[in-house]
């Protein structure tokens, strides 16, 4: 019997995440994101950490799901993402890898 | 060991850092390794196949120990996908299915790295987990003399300072310290790939039957073309004992332009008619992601300076070529750095002059030899994106014409295939790309086996950007 395809949310739920209180990802200047054509951060992230909020005209960062790969930092054409590792033993933990 | 006794501090408990720490400890150094996760492997992801000769050097007979290997890789397969078709090239040798198993094994990094860290501890390495390194400490002359680790908010930063004679930087692909401290150029989207993968659980017998394997044999499969939606990247399936590692790795630059998400790509790959039956009925037990440094030799930086050595992914040491190797370069570079560090400590001189022997060791080993050989590969692929987009479509389109059974004569079908090739690729463009490709992958070795081919390639090299190119073009236009 074919299994129902997992949504991204289902997949994220398979992974142990211990988010720290504060975000380890920071948008330096939201004004830069307003003028950004590609907003690559909203697509390249494996867990959709970044979302463009049209109402408030800003990027929302759901750092709690971050897999700490660093792709957003590399993809941002304006170097507008401040990136540091979460404190020791916080964040993602893979069981298989 | 009190803090004052630490001679070598290693930042990062992945394969490069663990190899470095073990090698340094084996030569008598007092080594402290910092791992930011709760244990080694917690943050690490790989496809993947462990190419093990450098492990064998570090731990002789390692595959016979209690190391958690999944399957020896007896078959390697390479496929090109288009939306509805696939063409495969597969190699299996019975020799690969017997000890020493062609020194390649599928592994899962969480258990493997954990095992490796226990080995390092047994070798005398002190491992501190849950410690984040945020920067380096330098003396007034700029020499690296230690590591700044993260302290609780409001605490004195001095509490997090760790001093050592040599620091080995093994922080991995997202090399924040190496970049900030000027050991490698700023990482650009073209230099880096993001990989996502699922671990898909299946019964052992199902994997054996589905992949036509015998006993505990395994297989590594790479997929190009539509597997990465025509971008610079590939899909992969590796057989583990009771699961498959199924994933896609793709250039961040290409991905950003495509508007696709990594998970979209992975779902497309899994839904391909040639992949779907392989993963059918499997249960996804993990989803994971990681970056891969793919800039090649030209995007590596300084491998050493006073008091510091940079190893593995942090240094950008990945063989970016169709071989696509990383963990073996990590372990080999780590080992070379660990040995260099311990020797420097024993001599009482950890200046860059002494530590430069690390680079010499890498030059003599496959690490920098391979990096040099394929230095042009990434640039070549960047200049020829058609290789993974137009070419797969045309070549598989031609094969489809040839294999299609219709009432037509064979001549009509072949003519159509040739027409497709001429119109969409063209002999001139085809040959130019092939020559450039051979050049990018270095003609040195070709010269040894076929001197005439090397002469031809040298000729082509010389003619590429000159009027000879037009003459060559004319020749092909007239004759094709």
Image (cartoon, coloured by chain):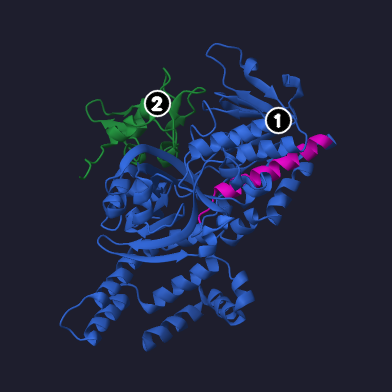
Chain colours: A green, B blue
- Taking depth in this image into account, of A32 and B389 the one nearest to the observer is B389
Residues marked 2 and 1 touching at CB (< 8 Å): no
- Do pointers 2 and 1 mark residues of a single chain? no
- Residue A90: give x, y in percent of width and height: 46, 23
Q: Residue at 46%, 60% (x, y): give it.
A: B75
Residue B443 visible in rendering: yes
Q: Quadrant of residue A80?
A: top left
Apparent side of residue B343 relative to residue B69 in the rendered image (left or right): right
Kind of element beneath mark 2: strand
Task: Please give the range of residues in magenta.
Answer: B324-346
Q: Residue at 35%, 45% (x, y): give it.
A: B203
* Distance (Cα) linking label 2 and label 1: 31 Å
**Chain where mark 1 sits:** B
Q: Which residue is mark 1?
A: B124
- Residue B98: give x, y in percent of width and height: 55, 58
Q: Is residue B230 magenta?
A: no
Tag on residue A17?
A: 2
Apparent side of residue B263 relative to residue B245 in the rendered image (left or right): left
**Chain where mark 2 sits:** A
Tell me: residue B272, above or below residue B409: above
């Amino acid at each position: 019997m074919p299994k129902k395809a997992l949504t991204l949310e289902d997949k994220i739920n398979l992974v142990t995440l211990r988010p720290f209180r504060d975000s380890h990802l920071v948008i330096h200047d939201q004004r830069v994101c307003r003028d950004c054509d590609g907003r690559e951060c909203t697509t390249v992230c494996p867990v959709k950490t970044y979302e463009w909020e049209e109402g408030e005209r800003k990027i929302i960062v759901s750092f709690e799901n971050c897999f700490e790969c660093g792709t957003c930092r590399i993809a941002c054409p304006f170097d507008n993402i401040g990136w540091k590792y979460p404190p020791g033993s916080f964040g993602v933990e893979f069981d298989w890898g | 060991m009190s803090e004052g006794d630490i001679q070598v501090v290693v930042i990062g408990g992945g394969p490069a850092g663990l190899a470095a720490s073990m090698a340094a400890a084996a030569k008598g150094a007092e080594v402290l390794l910092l791992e930011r996760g709760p244990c080694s492997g917690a943050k690490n992801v790989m496809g993947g196949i462990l190419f093990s000769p450098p492990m064998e050097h570090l731990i002789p007979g390692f595959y016979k120990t209690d190391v958690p290997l999944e399957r020896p890789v007896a078959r390697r397969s390479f496929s090109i996908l288009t939306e509805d078709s696939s063409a495969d090239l597969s190699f299996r040798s019975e020799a690969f299915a017997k000890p020493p198993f062609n020194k390649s094994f599928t592994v899962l990094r969480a258990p493997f790295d954990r095992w490796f860290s226990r080995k390092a501890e047994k070798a005398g390495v002190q491992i501190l987990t849950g410690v984040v390194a945020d920067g380096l400490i330098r003396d007034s002359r700029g020499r690296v003399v230690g590591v700044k680790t993260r302290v609780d908010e409001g605490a004195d930063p001095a509490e997090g300072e760790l001093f050592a004679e040599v620091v080995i930087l093994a922080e991995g692909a997202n090399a924040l310290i190496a970049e900030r401290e000027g050991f490698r150029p700023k990482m650009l989207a073209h230099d880096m790939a993001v990989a996502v993968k699922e671990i898909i659980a299946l019964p052992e017998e199902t994997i054996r039957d589905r992949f036509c394997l015998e006993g505990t044999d395994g297989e590594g499969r790479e997929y190009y073309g539509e597997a990465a939606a025509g971008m610079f990247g590939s899909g992969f399936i590796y057989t583990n004992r009771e699961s498959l590692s199924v994933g896609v790795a793709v250039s961040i630059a290409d991905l950003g332009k495509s508007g696709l998400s990594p998970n979209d790509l992975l779902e497309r790959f899994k839904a391909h008619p040639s992949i779907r039956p392989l993963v059918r009925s499997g249960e996804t037990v993990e989803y994971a992601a990681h970056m891969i440094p793919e800039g090649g030799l030209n995007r590596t930086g300084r491998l050493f300076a006073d008091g510091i050595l940079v190893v593995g992914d942090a240094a950008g040491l990945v063989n970016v070529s169709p071989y696509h190797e990383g963990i073996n370069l990590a372990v080999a570079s780590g080992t070379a750095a660990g040995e260099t560090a311990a020797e420097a400590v024993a001599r009482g001189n950890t200046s860059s002059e002494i530590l430069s022997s690390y680079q010499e060791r890498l030059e003599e080993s496959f690490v920098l030899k391979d990096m040099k050989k394929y230095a042009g590969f990434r640039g070549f692929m960047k200049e020829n994106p058609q290789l993974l987009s137009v070419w797969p479509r045309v070549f598989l389109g031609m094969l489809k014409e040839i294999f299609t059974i219709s009432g037509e004569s064979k001549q009509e079908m072949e003519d159509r295939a040739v027409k497709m090739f001429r119109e969409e690729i063209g002999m001139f463009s085809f040959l130019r790309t092939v020559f450039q490709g051979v050049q990018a992958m270095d003609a040195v070795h070709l010269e040894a086996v076929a001197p005439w081919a090397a002469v031809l390639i040298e000729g082509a090299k010389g003619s590429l950007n000159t009027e000879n190119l037009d003459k060559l073009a004319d020749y092909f236009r007239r004759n094709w």
